Each structure stands twice: as C-alpha cells, then as structure tokens.
Image (cartoon, helix red, strand yellow):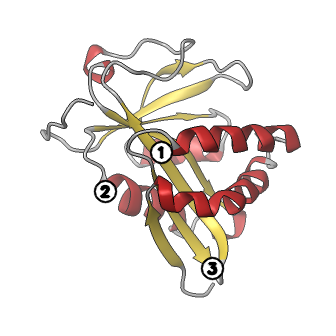
Amino acid sequence: MAELLWTLDDAEAAVSHTDDMRDLYAAVYAEPPYNEGPEHVRQFGRWWRDHLRQPGFALATARDAGVLVGAVYGHTMRSGQWMEPDADEPPAELRDAVKFFVVEWMVLPDYRSKGVGRHLLLRMLLQTRREPWAVLAANPAAPARRLYERLGFEQHGRVRPRTMPAMDVLVLRLNEGEESASL
C-alpha cells in the first residue's frame, strides 16, 4: 500500500467526489450483511445530494494512487433533532444538544484492519468537530458494529428505517465540558 492521500472537505469541495462516493458505497454495501444492489446505490445518490445541503457537512477521504479507498462523512443535527420518526427516544441531554450525525463510514476490504477507518473517523472527522456528541446508526450484524463499541460509542436505542433493517443508535461524547452554540 502506497502512501495514502488524506483530505477533509466541506460540502462545496465534496461535490467533486460524488461519482467516487457512489462507487465506494456500491462496493462496500454489496457485501454481507447488507447485500445491497443497484437500487440502493441509486438511493444513496439521492441521499448524498441531500446530505451535501445539510449544515456542518464534512467529508474525510483516503485515496491510494487516486482511488478512493475510504470515506466518512456527516453533518450537524440541530438541538431537538433526532434520528427518524421511528427511533427510540433519546435521553433529554442528547435530544437537546447539537450533535454531529455520522451518516456513512466506508472502507474497502483491502484497507480494513490497517487503521484507515479509525484515522478517517477519529483523527480527521470527529477531532475537528465542535459538537459535544457524535451519533450514528449501525447494522447490529455488521462487523463495524463491534468496532464502534471499542471506539467508545454507546448504544442509545434503535432506529427502524422504512427501507432497511432496524439499526442500533450509537453515541460518542466528543467534547467533554465544551458547550456548542445552538443552531
């Protein structure tokens, strides 16, 4: 593996990664337990365009010889916002706080267990955030689910999306004692 090129982009710069993000999504989510196909990839494309318009959007990427091998992105969730209508209610402290929602974290199989994903998520993306909490949803059958716990994420209920299996809602305290301005 050659030296990786790491980038952290805002929404304006992230637009240029759209095709590569779609290809990365297709490769990662074709694997079990997801087994997603072309219709899911098209849906991701629609979600991606919507996510780019969200406040506080950020994308961290890793490229090897120009090929996107890993990416993680998310956006700010305002105070009072939570996952979806079909999610378990969080503690008031979480609901009332500004949060960073980690939407996707994807790494190609050949780059897993080498620190690429950890570096993208913790060092590049979350270390730069001002929000006191990070929130994500994880498929309980996915290997990444156990990794989230090792990284310090704690389960705070489940979300039941209409188009996919129920997922665990996981939360990580980012900035202990630091207050973020309400959005």
Residue under label 3: 64
Q: Is residue 112 at all visible to an observer of this figure?
A: no
Q: Nearer the viewer, mark 1 or mark 2?
A: 1
- Quarter of image, res 51: top right
For badge 1, the amino acid type reads Gly
For badge 2, the amino acid type reads Gln
Residue under label 1: 74
| The C terminus, quarter of image | top left
State the SS at label 2.
Answer: helix
Q: Position of residue 174 (x, y in %)?
A: 27, 44
**Marks 2 and 3, how far apart at CA:** 23 Å
**Residue at x-position 14% and y-position 36%:** 179
Using the image as rendered, state which of residue 128 and residue 145 is in the foreground: 128
Q: Position of residue 139 (x, y in %)?
A: 64, 34
**Marks 3 and 1, how far apart at CA:** 22 Å
Between discs 1 and 2, the one toward the N terminus: 1
Residue 11 versus residue 78 in the image, above or below: below
Residue under label 2: 127
- Quarter of image, res 180: top left
Between discs 2 and 3, the one toward the N terminus: 3
**Residue at x-position 65% and y-position 22%:** 166
Using the image as rendered, state which of residue 151 and residue 95 is in the foreground: 95
Q: Residue furthest bottom?
A: 2
For badge 3, the amino acid type reads Asp
Which mark, by number, is residue 146?
none
Using the image as rendered, state which of residue 138 and residue 82 is in the foreground: 82
**Marks 1 and 2, how far apart at CA:** 13 Å
